[in-house]
């Protein structure tokens, strides 16, 4: 299966991007389309432990 880099948090609608498999995940925009408060990359584990539920965008 090919790597899907565009992700969405199904709880908030915030969008994320993961450029490489198993790499850092970067916020791209909030659900309302504005810039995220921080564009710092986070690990998948950090995001999920913070309550994020990420899924491939458009899927």
Image (tube, rainbow, N blue to C red):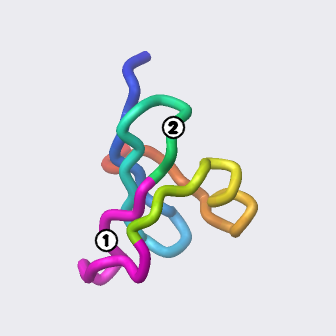
Q: Quadrant of the C terminus?
A: top left
Q: Which mark is residue 23?
A: 2
Q: Position of residue 48 (x, y in %)?
A: 68, 57
The correct choice, above or below, for 18 with respect to 37 in the image is: above
Determine if the magenta segment contains residue 4. no
Mark 2 crowd level (few <14, some 14–19, many ≥20, 10 Å Cα): few
Residue at left 54%, top 53%? 54
Residue 12 as seen in the image, left or right of residue 7: right
Q: Residue furthest right?
A: 49
Q: Position of residue 13 (x, y in %)?
A: 42, 70
Residue at left 45%, top 64%? 40
Q: Quadrant of residue 37?
A: bottom left
The correct choice, above or below, for 19 with respect to 44 in the image is: above
Q: To which residue does mark 1 refer?
A: 29
Q: Quadrant of residue 19?
A: top left
Question: What separation in Å lies between label 1 and label 2 (alpha carbons)?
Answer: 19 Å
> What segment carries the magenta color?
26-38
Please tell me whether mark 2 sits on a helix, a strand or a loop.
loop
Q: Quadrant of the N terminus?
A: top left
Q: Which mark is residue 44?
A: none
The correct choice, above or below, for 15 with respect to 24 in the image is: below
Determine if the magenta segment contains residue 29. yes
Residue at left 48%, top 50%? 25
């Amino acid at each position: 299966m090919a790597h899907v880099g565009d992700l969405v948090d199904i709880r908030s609608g915030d969008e994320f991007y993961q450029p490489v498999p198993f790499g850092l995940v970067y916020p791209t925009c909030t659900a309302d389309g504005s810039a995220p408060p921080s564009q710092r990359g986070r690990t998948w584990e950090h995001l999920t432990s913070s309550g994020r539920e990420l899924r491939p965008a458009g899927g």
